[in-house]
């Protein structure tokens, strides 16, 4: 049989009643289809297609490639007609234009199933054999051969003939055995054979596909007796099976069963010799790795893994794709600082001096670092704390890490987590991937060259997640002192001890940090700077830094405290000092330009010079007076610091409808509803009639409508604004307030007090009403920073109204007299 089988090559038979031009799958021929095919009349005259290297048997489907012009014309004409042709094999396949003497006498009537135009320009035709015929006389030779034919009768044994049945069964078993023994023949061939029911088709199918020359197949085609033909096929198959078994036997004998150790040694010596001949000897590189490994302070597990990996590398061909992967892996193991630590500096006074030198304020953070140093000095060893510095932008959270590293005498590394979306950035990729590398945690540890650096995880609140995984979940292991001693990186594939690393995370907002991650960190809030603190920071750090960067000498530019304060209050609006640094940089650059162009300029920059250098100042938030009823100054917290906002309320005749505008959030809207309901239920205390609330519509507005606003801290401000509107009494001058309200009449504490107090001071507020529970927050602020401010602490909402409203009414108050007679009408 042939060494290649496929659905076309196996040539399962077709039945005429299911064949059309769109046939993609060719079913096997059933007994009924065979009877129908044998009953078809053989025409007296047929167009003859000569075949060079194959023989077509009845019932079998074969593809043929048509290249000769005569053959192409024949196929085209036949395909347009009844698609029936005569197929005869050539005696000599080298003859290009055969005559009747060059053709065998016995051929097969064929039906054209499909004609295909191939990409190379050739025409492929799929044909199915029908019945055999004998070639009699040539009728024409142009444009192709036409000849008269007569049917070639087939002698079939009786269906009940047991000898023939045994012959067919032996034929099928032998063919299946050949398919099983030959590695080149797919198992689908056996499936096709098993499903052939017709003995005649089985003999023809095997004859067509067996491994025999064309002349031998032609002899089989010319045998009229089916039983005799089956015997010839069986004889050929037996020879083929014997050859196949002999071939397999020879192949198995030449296999030498070498012992594994001998085989490995033999191949290793061969590879070494080849590498030396090619000049690719990498022994020096491997020797250097082993020398470097002796100095590493790693445990037995790491040492064993390294030895295993380098032994594997020694057996590799340097040109192999995996060689560079294995080399990179070993280099990572050697570069990682396994148990290599820097010596901590336990001089607490020096550490305190370094922290104070680099950063002004931040007393809580400095105190926590000194506590850690003190415990480390007394105990000699402790797990480093996981600190999270939380505060607005520009207050020095990131730069504080450098100062901490300097004060401890440790190495400093920083990793930005902003926009990180892939978990593999933390844990690394498996080294089987192309371009795999360790996670950024171990990469930064490797870069520091120490196992106990100060490691800044910057912008931890801005970690994202997507289908690649959740990096914040991967950080749970990194930031847990109980787990990070056995941190597992996918690339290194071993545990690495991170317990000695001092992790310091920074964040602008705690709300976006995963709760489980937030629970593992010690949160230290860094609030915004006061104006006094900003002046000191500008004088001590920012201005000297900009003078040095811009190449201006200290004596060439001078800014006094008053000028710096003017810059802070009129050209910056922030909790930190980032914008202040940019403004100072602009002033220094202006001075540098004047010096370079030899222009006259004022060495001491005054307020009048700032407009020319920086342009007009932005309008500062100022207290706007108490001439209008219903307008109260509130205090708000924003991501960039504190701010003041004005709550405005007005009344119009109506039915008691409440309207809220100013881009307010749900919590703020609820505060307004609570304030109005409280006033309705306590109207008698303010001398108001309950009916007044049903005759006037209330409108509350918070300016700067494009800015979204939310939170409960404007509760008492809204209450005071509504009370002022309904009583038409003035609000006390230069007064601001912040606090949450309840239906029971209590004033609850709110957050962001330091930022709000600083905003109030900038706006020339003199008095501030707060919840009594916020008193502790005021006590944490240095007395110098809140000098000139008076704080009034309250517990009840009615106290706020009594303290905030004056007895004096506004000019031209609204007449809120109840007109009962008109109501009755």
Image: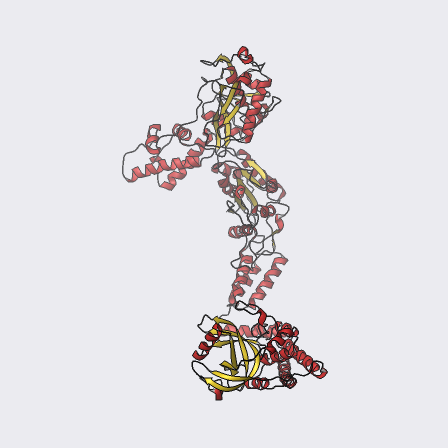
Is the C terminus in the top left, top right, bottom left or bottom right quadrant? top right
Q: Residue at x 53, y 84 (%)?
A: 149
Q: Residue at x 47, y 85 (%)?
A: 139
Q: Quadrant of residue 151?
A: bottom right
Q: Position of residue 496 (x, y in %)?
A: 60, 52
Foreground pick, 394 / 693: 693
> Looking at the image, is 302 positioned above or below residue 210?
above
Residue 509 visible somewhere in the drawing: yes
Is the N terminus in the top left, top right, bottom left or bottom right quadrant? bottom right
> Looking at the image, is 575 positioned above or below residue 332?
above
Report how many numbered discs are placed on residues in the image.
0
Q: Position of residue 480 (x, y in %)?
A: 61, 45
Foreground pick, 245 / 491: 245
Q: Residue at x 57, y 64 (%)?
A: 310
Q: Quadrant of residue 30?
A: bottom right
Q: Position of residue 604 (x, y in %)?
A: 34, 31
Snapshot colouring = secondary structure
In the picture, measured across the screen, residue 67 lies left or right of residue 686, that is left
Q: Position of residue 633 (x, y in %)?
A: 49, 23
> Looking at the image, is 474 positioned above or below residue 434?
above
Residue found at the very far bottom of the displayed protein? 101
> Looking at the image, is 331 positioned above or below residue 387?
below
Residue found at the very far top of the displayed protein? 821
Foreground pick, 568 / 533: 568
Foreground pick, 429 / 674: 674
Residue 261 visible somewhere in the drawing: no
């Amino acid at each position: 049989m042939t060494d290649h089988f496929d659905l076309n090559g196996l040539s399962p038979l077709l039945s005429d009643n299911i064949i059309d031009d769109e046939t993609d799958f060719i079913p096997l021929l059933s007994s009924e289809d065979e009877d129908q095919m044998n009953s078809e009349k053989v025409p007296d005259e047929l167009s003859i297609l000569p075949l060079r290297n194959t023989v077509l048997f009845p019932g079998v489907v074969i593809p043929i490639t048509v290249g000769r012009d005569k053959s192409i014309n024949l196929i085209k004409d036949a395909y347009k007609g009844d698609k029936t042709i005569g197929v005869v094999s050539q005696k000599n396949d080298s003859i290009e234009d055969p005559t009747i003497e060059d053709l065998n006498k016995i051929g097969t009537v064929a039906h054209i199933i499909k004609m295909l135009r191939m990409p190379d320009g050739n025409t492929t035709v799929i044909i199915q054999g029908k019945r055999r015929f004998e070639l009699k006389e040539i009728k024409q030779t142009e444009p192709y051969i036409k000849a008269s034919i007569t049917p070639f009768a087939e002698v079939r044994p009786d269906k009940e003939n047991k000898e023939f049945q045994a012959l067919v069964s032996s034929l099928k078993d032998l063919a299946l055995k050949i398919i099983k023994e030959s590695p080149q023949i797919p198992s689908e061939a056996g499936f096709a054979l098993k499903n052939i029911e017709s003995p005649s088709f089985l003999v023809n199918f095997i004859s067509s596909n067996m491994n025999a020359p064309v002349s031998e197949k032609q002899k089989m085609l010319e045998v009229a007796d089916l039983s005799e033909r089956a015997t010839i096929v069986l004889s050929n198959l037996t020879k083929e099976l014997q050859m196949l078994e002999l071939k397999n036997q020879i192949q198995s004998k030449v296999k030498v069963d070498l012992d594994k150790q001998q085989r490995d040694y033999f191949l290793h010596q061969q590879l070494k010799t080849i590498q030396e001949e090619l000049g690719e000897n990498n022994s020096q590189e491997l020797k250097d790795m082993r020398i470097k490994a002796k100095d590493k302070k790693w445990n037995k597990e790491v040492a064993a893994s390294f030895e295993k990996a380098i032994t594997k590398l020694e057996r590799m061909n340097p040109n192999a794709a995996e060689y560079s992967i294995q080399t990179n892996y070993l280099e990572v193991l050697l570069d990682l600082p396994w148990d290599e630590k820097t010596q901590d500096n336990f001089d607490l006074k020096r550490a305190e001096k370094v922290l104070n030198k680099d950063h002004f304020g931040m007393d809580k953070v400095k105190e926590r670092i000194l506590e850690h140093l003190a415990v480390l000095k007394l105990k000699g060893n402790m797990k480093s704390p996981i600190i999270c510095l939380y505060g607005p932008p520009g207050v020095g959270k990131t730069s504080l890490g450098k100062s901490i590293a300097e004060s401890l005498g440790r190495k400093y590394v920083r990793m930005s987590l902003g926009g990180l979306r892939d978990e593999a950035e933390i844990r690394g990729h498996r080294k089987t991937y192309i371009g795999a590398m360790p996670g950024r945690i171990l990469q930064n540890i490797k870069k520091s060259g120490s196992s106990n650096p100060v490691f800044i995880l910057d912008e931890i609140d801005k970690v994202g997640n997507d289908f690649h995984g959740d990096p914040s979940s991967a950080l749970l292991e990194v930031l847990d002192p109980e787990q990070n001693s056995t941190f597992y990186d996918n690339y290194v594939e071993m545990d690495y001890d991170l317990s000695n690393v001092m992790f310091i995370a920074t964040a602008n907002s705690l709300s976006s940090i995963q709760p489980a991650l937030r629970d593992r960190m010690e949160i230290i809030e860094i609030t915004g700077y006061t104006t006094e603190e900003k002046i000191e920071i500008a004088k001590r750090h920012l201005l000297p830094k900009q003078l040095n960067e811009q190449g201006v000498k200290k004596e060439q530019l001078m800014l006094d405290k008053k000028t710096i304060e003017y810059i802070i209050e009129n050209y910056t609006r922030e909790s930190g000092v980032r914008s202040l640094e940019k403004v100072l940089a602009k002033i220094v650059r202006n001075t540098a330009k004047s010096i370079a162009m030899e222009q006259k300029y004022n060495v001491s920059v005054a307020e009048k010079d700032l407009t020319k250098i920086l342009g007009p100042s932005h309008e500062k938030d100022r207290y706007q007076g108490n001439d209008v009823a219903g307008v109260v100054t509130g205090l708000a917290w924003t991501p960039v610091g504190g701010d003041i906002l004005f709550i405005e309320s007005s009344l119009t005749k109506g039915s008691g409808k409440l309207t809220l505008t100013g881009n307010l959030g749900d919590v703020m809207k609820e505060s307004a509803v609570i304030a109005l309901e409280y006033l309705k239920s306590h109207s008698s205390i303010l001398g108001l009639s309950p009916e007044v609330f049903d005759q006037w519509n209330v409108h509350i507005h918070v300016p700067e409508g494009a800015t979204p606003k939310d939170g409960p801290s404007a509760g008492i401000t809204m209450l005071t604004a509504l009370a002022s509107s309904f009583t038409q009494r003035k609000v006390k001058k230069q007064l601001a307030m912040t606090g949450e309200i309840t239906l029971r009449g209590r004033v609850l504490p709110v957050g962001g007090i330091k930022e709000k107090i600083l905003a109030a001071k900038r706006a020339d507020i003199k008095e501030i009403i707060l919840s009594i529970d916020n008193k502790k927050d005021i006590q944490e602020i240095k007395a110098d920073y809140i000098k000139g401010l008076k704080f009034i602490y309250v517990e009840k909402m009615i106290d706020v109204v009594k303290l905030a409203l004056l007895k004096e009414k506004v000019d031209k108050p609204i007449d809120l007299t109840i007109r009962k007679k008109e109501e009755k009408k």
